[in-house]
Amino acid sequence: AEFRKSIRFKKKMKKKEEEKDRRSKEDESRGARDQGRASLTMATNERRMSELCADMNACMERFKSREDHVSRDENGVEKGRVRFFDLRGVDENSFSGNERQKIAEAMQMLRERKSKGVALPKIIKVTPQNMEKFLKQSQNRYSAIKDMPTATLNNGKTIPLIGLGTWKSKPGQIKEATIHALRAGYRHIDCAEYYANEHEIGQALQIVFAEGVVKREDIFLTSKLWNNHHSKDSVKPAVQKILKDLKVQHLDLLLIHWPVTGNVGPSVQPTVKETWQAMEELVSEGLVHSIGVSNFSAKKVDDILTYAKVAPSVLQVEVHPYWRQDSLLKYCKEKSIHMTAFSPLGSPDSSSMFQRSGPKLMDDPILTAIAAKLNRSPAQCLIRWGIQHGTSILPKSVNEGRIKSNLDVIDWELP
């Protein structure tokens, strides 16, 4: 009897365990279904929100007042975006019925997200009442450089001796660098068609101009004509494209980037003369204020002077203590041509090309000893050397601190 009782008890307990397992599996299955439905709902909501965002962007495009301000990390990846709209006079009648319906749906979804603690885009309304506050905030970011050294070109125009170089920057970096430079006090920006970043510089200029401190007439803008745009029919369209990218009406200086065109043969075709005369026409039309050349020898400049109605104002070449260009600088002074130095901190490219041995310029022990004695950085000493050498200089950096530091060369001299 005891044995049969034990058997019945074990069967009863086993049945309870099986029932418990069955219910647990049902609960798990139900939970998985609920989680799946929740995930599906979330995915559906995200997809719908993306669709609404695309619709809203298209809808608001007509109210944009200027280019978006995009901030990026050191790798060029976008980390933030500010959009600008002019909504004066805009009411519900400015939108179609379909647009109003989508706006209402988007607002409802945003409210739900906000109630769950999701961070939403911040909207700042600028009114006549708070405009002064925002202008002051913008203006406080700007520094005025007292006694910025300049040179007067042979046509009477003035060029600041320190400019920002924009060659070899990663996508997205030069826009921020240009904004930092102009806020720090730079008033000379060196660009080029070949650098493929003039559209970013144009966006930076629009942001800076909108902040109301720096005007177009305060900035000396240089660009360069690339090798495939040397023919008479190509020069003006290329410059118009440059102006469109920079979002300006004229260039302060246009240079022939190289004395070559890429065409193979015993002579340069199209000729430099054809290119130069086309550039002279741009001066007459007011699209360009000054013209010059880059990477040209004295012999090639001499040839231009035999037919030029508008003399070259500037010759831009590599200049630094390892590549002094003394004879070319003397020639330029004799011909009243201003020399601009690119790569004033040294150039790994030219060092490799000419197989220079020894330390890099910035690591030169003589330079580092002078910098330590003067309590300056090697870069500051090289920039100061360039000014005292008789050139304008184009240090390049995308780092805000170094951009500012490179300007701290005005109120002292190298012994």
Image (cartoon, rainbow, N blue to C red):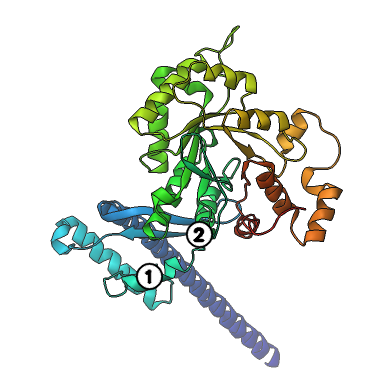
Image quarter of residue 98: bottom left
Residue drawn at (70%, 89%) of the image: 3
Name the element at disc 2.
helix
| Left or right: residue 153 compared with residue 347 | left
Name the element at disc 1.
helix
Q: Is residue 120 visible?
A: no
- Which of pointers 1 and 2 indicates the residue nearer the eye? 2
Q: Which mark is residue 183?
A: 2
Residue to which mark 1 is pinned: 134
Q: Position of residue 48 (x, y in %)?
A: 34, 58
Q: Earlier in the sequence, mark 1 or mark 2?
A: 1
In the orientation shown, which residue stands out farthest toward the bottom?
A: 2
Q: How many marks?
A: 2
| Left or right: residue 5 compared with residue 246 | right
Q: Which mark is residue 11?
A: none
- Between 172 and 414, the residue placed more toward the observer is 414
Q: Position of residue 86 (x, y in %)?
A: 26, 60
| Left or right: residue 400 compared with residue 379 | left
Q: Residues within 10 Å of mark 2 (few under 14, many from 20)?
A: many
Label 1 vs label 2: CA separation? Answer: 16 Å
Q: Position of residue 59 (x, y in %)?
A: 26, 54
Which quarter of the rendering shows the N terminus?
Answer: bottom right
Residue drawn at (37%, 78%) of the image: 115
- Between 336 and 199, the residue placed more toward the observer is 336
| Above-or-below relation of 47 to 189 | below
Residue drawn at (65%, 90%) of the image: 5
What amino acid type is highlighted by mark number 2?
Arg
In the orientation shown, which residue stands out farthest toward the left?
A: 93
- Between 315 and 2, the residue placed more toward the observer is 315
Q: Residues within 10 Å of mark 1 (few under 14, many from 20)?
A: few
